[in-house]
Every structure is written in C-alpha cells, then in structure tokens.
C-alpha cells in the first residue's frame, strides 16, 4: 500500500518539490480514498474481507459448535435454525467448520501471494530492463518452472517437502513467481521504449532510478491485477490440493477438504458441497472486486 | 527479429534438457521405494531386490537417466510400474480426450473473453461494462471443481441434458469445457479490458478520432492491435493453467485423459508414467511459450529484441 501511494504521489507531483511532498502525499491518499469509495461493489467486498479477517482472528470464539464434535443423531441434515449451514457426514456443524477454516485459507493464500509478487516483480523488472543474459537466465528459469502444470508442481513440492501448511505456502508461491516475472517483463519491455524513459536516460538518470521511478509505476496496474488474481488463485490452488486429498489433513476443517469429503453426498445432501464451495467463491470474488477497485483508484494513467 | 527467433528456437534444446533432468530428479526426491511399492506389502526382501534390479533402480542416477533418455529417443517410454503396460500406449489412449478438452476450453474462452473485454472497455462504466466485469469476476472466482459439481448436479442429474462424465459423445465435453475455460475466459476479459483502456488513452487514439476515423477503426485497428500483446501473453501463460486445471476437471468429470492418469500415477508412484507425462506437458508448454514470445515482435514492432 505504501509503495502504491508513493507512486501516486510521484505521478501527481511529477517527482519534483521536496517541500510540497507531505501535502501531495496527503492529497493523493485522500484522492485514493475518494476514488476507492466510489466503487460500491469493491467497498462492499472490502468490508467482507475485513469481516473475514476478523473471523479468522476471533474464529474460535465465534463458532456455535465445536467444529470437530460429531453428532451421530443429525448426520447430513440440511440447513436449519439449529445448524444454519447443516451438518456433514459425521453430524459436525458445517458453519463452525467453515469459520474455523477461514484462518487456514487466508493465512496460506496471503503469504504465498506476497512471496510470489515480491520475487516475481523484481525478476520481471530486471529481466525486461537489462535484457541479454540476465533476461535469458530469468526467462529460461521461469520457462522451466512454467513447463509443469501448476497443480502438479505444487503436488510435487508438497510431496518432496512433506505435508504441512508452510509447504503448501512454498508450493503455491513457487508457481506464482514465473507468472509475475513474465507479466512484468512484458510491460517493462513496452515501458522501456517510451519517451519518458528515453528522456530520463538522456538526462543521465541511473538505471536504478529509471527502473524504480519510471518503469515500476508503469507495471503497477499489472502487479495489482496479478496480485488480485493470485490471491484468489492461491485460495483455489490450496483448496484444489485438499480436494485431491493432497493438501490439508482430512481432519482439518479446510474448505477444500470439506468439499472433497462432501462430494460423495452431492445427490442426497448437496449443502455439504454447496456451502464450502460458496464460501471459497465469495472469498475469491471479494479479493478480486477489491483488486478491481484498487486498480481504478491507483492506476497512474487514469489520474488526470 | 530473425536472429531472435533463431536464438529462441535453439534455446529450446537446453531448456528441454534441463526440464528432463529436473523431472528425473524431482521424481526421485519423492519419498517412497518404488520397488517395495511394486512388490506389495507381503513381498520378501529378495523379491524387492529382484524388482529393483529389473527396473534398473540399483544403477547410479546418471546411468538411469541416460538409459531413460536413450530409450525415449527410440520411442520407448518404458512400462508402467503399476500395470506393466507400455507407457507410450497408455499416453496415446489418454491423449485425445485432454487435447479436445483443452482446445474446446481455450477456443470459447478466448472468443468470449476478448469480446467481453472489448465491449467493457468501449462501454466503460455503462451497464455492458458492469455485466461483463461481474461475469468475468465470477468466472475467475469460482472453484473449478465446485463449478463442475454444480453443473453436474443441475444439467446432468436434474435436467438430464448432458452426461455426468466420461467421453462417450461430443456432448460429454460441454460441461467440462465450460468448467475448465471459465477461469481463462475471465482472465482474458479482464486483461483485454485493462489493456484496451490503456491503449485508448494513448495519443494516437486521440489523433485517430481527431482525424475523423470511424470508432470501429480506432478500436479495432489501433487500440485492439496494441492491446493484443498483453492478451497474447496472458493466453499463452494460461495454457499451463489449462493443463493443470485438466487434472481437476478430468477428476470431477471422470474423463480418461492425461490429467486423471497423472493423479492416479502420483498416488501409486508410477514413476515411468509420471516422467513421461511431465515431459509431454513440458514439451507442449515450452513450444507454446516460444510462439508467444515470437508473437510479441509480430504484434508490436516497437519492441526490439536486440541482441547487442
């Protein structure tokens, strides 16, 4: 966030005037808030994510039932006043398990994406800007990673490192890096040829300054869109691993694992599949909507 | 450009070599003794050793690799550790369902995705934009395995329009393709829109409009052409996603394709099949990346692939 507002400041101030900087920063922030709050859907999604984060933090205090306590008298019962989202094949309260699973899903996906974005963006900028052997090395390495279907790469990494949430994070982060690197490289290639980069270069600006002050802001819309997509993608990947029985342990109240377990009961008790899927869908949707709002509010070129 | 194309073509050879070594090492890093697995729980130590010898698992790793690659060039991918069948035959019988699934998914996703992207950009902040983007955002957010299950429940179980699984007829591909393509369609719609909006703010678009060019020409010939560079990158990048996604979709829809074979092979540590599948996927994907890179230059001559 701080990097993004700095960019907005740089764009609006044209990179000049030390004294005006705090005022500019304030107005850029105010403008960002004004623009973001205009996006009603994104705002609603943002509130949903804040609620999810609160649920993740205070989950254990919010569950109406013990998420792991079986109740053999009410197995596979549909949604009711007693069990809002029904019960699973062991009679466990699905809502309680979904609440408990929020922490797992958010922790895994957020950390994976931030790791991927950090390394991917740096590699993409360096690759696109310097070209030559560095570009070849970075792009060939990402081609190697890219040559494996992502889910399989994740399965392989988890299989080698052993099960556990940390390893799922590493697996999901690793297959995210090349996508960031390639995307940012292609934007960098275009930005490198623009007049303002040529102007900066002819004024004697150093490479580091050109990359961070001129090219990096150009890549931001793509970084934001990609981060947005990857948070969703990371939640989907982690739940896919669980769905295939290779992610979270079956005993854990993981959203994907719940869906996988419920699959056999689709025809007699569809709620066992519908609710975990719906919460994954809504969470990913919320992150995507917020990303969209951020993009419209932050895209330097949209400022005029 | 020509020099760059040649460089990339030659670059594919070492890349394939690295991938093949990685695939080979990767499989051997997975814990578990294949000989013990093939022999079964009740096998004696002698039986296990016999199988290990027969599979060449006693040889040093580099020797195993050279033997494997040597056979590969002869078209011999070995036999499945699990079933004993030639791997090449197993792959051949599983190849077409996955290819059809991938092609159908990509085709509808590209056409609908780019179309939604263009319409949304042109009608920015009007209702077609909102509808397009809500569709796209929903498509990207929905878990494929869940979408597949919901589609089966609604269109197969309740309405009876399509089969619940298998590949007995062309209609079997409808629901799986919709499931697999939904994510790509959405990504392409979003990227096309973003990219089109960026292009349409450029000076040459203003110039075009000032010259009195028809909006169709401005959008179609000028804005779209420059946006395609991003779209091509994303579409190319997403091919791996399709291959990965086919693992999930084939599992949900019981399609006897490469993805499902892969899941089964990993569960049984069927090394020979996993190796062959990984090399196949990798080769396919590397070639697509090559085409994507070459298309950069064709679509945007401004980008120089200078090798100085």
Image (tube, grey):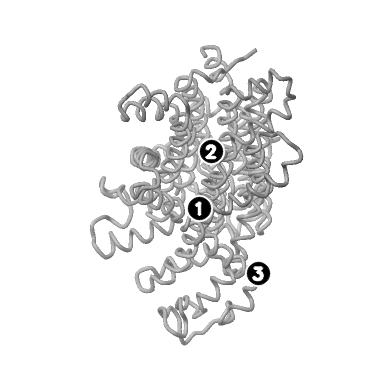
In this orientation, which residue lies closer to the viewer: B85 or B245? B245
The residues bearing labels 2 and 1 have C-alpha atoms spaced at a distance of: 25 Å
Task: Let me know if residue B167 appears in the view.
Answer: yes
User: Which one is earlier in the sequence, the residue at label 1 or at label 3?
Assistant: 3
Above or below for A252 versus A229: below
Q: Residues within 10 Å of mark 2 (few under 14, many from 20)?
A: few
**For numbered disc 2, what is the local secondary structure?**
loop
Image location of residue B158, percent across then percent down? 26, 65
Chain under callout 1 = A
Q: Is residue A73 left or right of residue A294?
A: left
Q: Which residue is mark 1?
A: A288
**For numbered disc 3, what is the local secondary structure?**
helix
Numbered mark located on residue B77 in the image: none
Residue at screen point 68% across, 43% down? A6
User: Which one is earlier in the sequence, the residue at label 3 or at label 2?
Assistant: 3
Instruction: Mark 1 and mark 3 in contact? Answer it, CB < 8 Å.
Output: no
Residue at screen point 63% across, 33% down? A124
The residues bearing labels 3 and 2 have C-alpha atoms spaced at a distance of: 40 Å
Mark in the foreground, 2 or 1:
2
**For numbered disc 1, what is the local secondary structure?**
helix
User: Which one is earlier in the sequence, the residue at label 2 or at label 1?
Assistant: 1
Q: Which residue is mark 2?
A: A304
The residues bearing labels 1 and 3 have C-alpha atoms spaced at a distance of: 22 Å
Q: Which residue is mark 3?
A: A57
């Amino acid at each position: 966030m701080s990097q993004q507002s700095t960019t907005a400041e740089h764009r609006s101030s044209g990179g000049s005037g030390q004294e005006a900087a705090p005022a500019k920063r304030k107005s850029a922030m105010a403008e960002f808030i004004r623009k973001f709050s205009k996006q009603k859907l994104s705002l609603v999604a943002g509130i949903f994510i804040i609620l999810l984060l609160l649920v993740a933090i205070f989950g254990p205090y919010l569950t109406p039932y013990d998420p792991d306590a079986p109740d053999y008298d009410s197995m596979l019962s549909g949604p009711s006043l007693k069990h809002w989202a029904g019960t699973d094949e062991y009679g466990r309260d699905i809502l309680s398990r979904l609440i408990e699973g929020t922490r797992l899903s958010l922790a895994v996906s957020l950390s994976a994406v931030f790791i991927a974005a950090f390394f991917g963006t740096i590699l993409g900028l360096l690759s696109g800007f310097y070209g030559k052997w560095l570009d070849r090395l970075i792009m060939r390495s990402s081609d190697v990673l890219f040559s494996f279907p992502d889910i399989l790469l994740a399965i392989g990494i988890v299989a080698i490192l052993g099960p556990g949430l940390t390893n799922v994070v590493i697996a999901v982060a690793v297959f995210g890096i090349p996508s960031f690197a390639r995307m940012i490289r292609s934007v960098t290639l275009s930005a490198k040829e623009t007049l303002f980069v040529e102007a900066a270069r002819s004024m004697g600006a150093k490479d580091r300054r050109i990359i961070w002050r001129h090219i990096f802001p150009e890549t931001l819309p793509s970084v934001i869109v990609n981060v947005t997509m990857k948070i969703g993608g990371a939640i989907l990947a982690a739940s896919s691993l669980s769905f295939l029985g290779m992610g979270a342990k079956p005993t854990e109240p993981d959203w994907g694992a719940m869906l996988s377990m419920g699959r056999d009961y689709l025809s007699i008790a569809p709620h066992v599949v519908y609710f975990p899927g719906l919460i994954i869908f809504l969470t990913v949707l919320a992150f995507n909507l917020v990303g969209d709002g951020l993009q419209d509010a932050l895209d330097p070129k949209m400022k005029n | 450009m020509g020099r760059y194309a040649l460089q990339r073509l030659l670059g594919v050879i070492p890349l394939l070599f690295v991938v093949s070594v990685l695939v080979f090492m990767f499989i051997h890093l997975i814990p578990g003794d294949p000989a013990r697995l093939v022999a079964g729980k009740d096998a004696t130590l002698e039986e296990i050793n016999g199988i290990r010898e027969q599979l060449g698992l006693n040889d040093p790793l580099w020797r195993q690799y050279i033997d494997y690659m040597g056979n590969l060039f002869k078209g011999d991918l070995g036999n499945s550790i699990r079933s004993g069948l030639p791997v090449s035959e197993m792959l051949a019988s599983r190849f077409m369902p996955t290819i059809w699934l991938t092609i159908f998914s990509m085709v509808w996703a590209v056409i609908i995705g780019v179309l939604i992207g263009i319409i949304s950009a042109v009608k920015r902040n009007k209702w077609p934009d909102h509808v397009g983007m809500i569709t796209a955002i929903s498509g990207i957010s929905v878990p494929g395995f869940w979408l597949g299950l919901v589609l089966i429940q609604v269109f197969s179980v309740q309405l009876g329009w399509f089969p619940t699984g298998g590949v007995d007829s062309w209609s079997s591909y409808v629901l799986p393709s919709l499931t697999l393509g939904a994510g790509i369609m959405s990504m392409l719609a979003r990227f096309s829109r973003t990219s089109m909006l960026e292009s349409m703010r450029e000076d040459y678009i203003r110039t075009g409009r000032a010259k009195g060019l028809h909006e169709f020409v401005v959008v179609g010939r000028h804005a779209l052409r420059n946006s395609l560079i991003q779209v091509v990158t994303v579409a190319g990048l997403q091919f791996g996603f399709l291959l990965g996604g086919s693992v999930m979709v084939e599992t949900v829809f019981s399609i006897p394709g490469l993805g499902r074979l892969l899941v089964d092979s990993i569960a049984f540590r069927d090394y020979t099949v996993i190796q062959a599948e990984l090399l196949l996927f990798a080769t396919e994907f590397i070639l697509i990346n090559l085409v994507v890179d070459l298309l950069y230059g064709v679509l945007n001559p401004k980008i120089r692939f200078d090798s100085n």
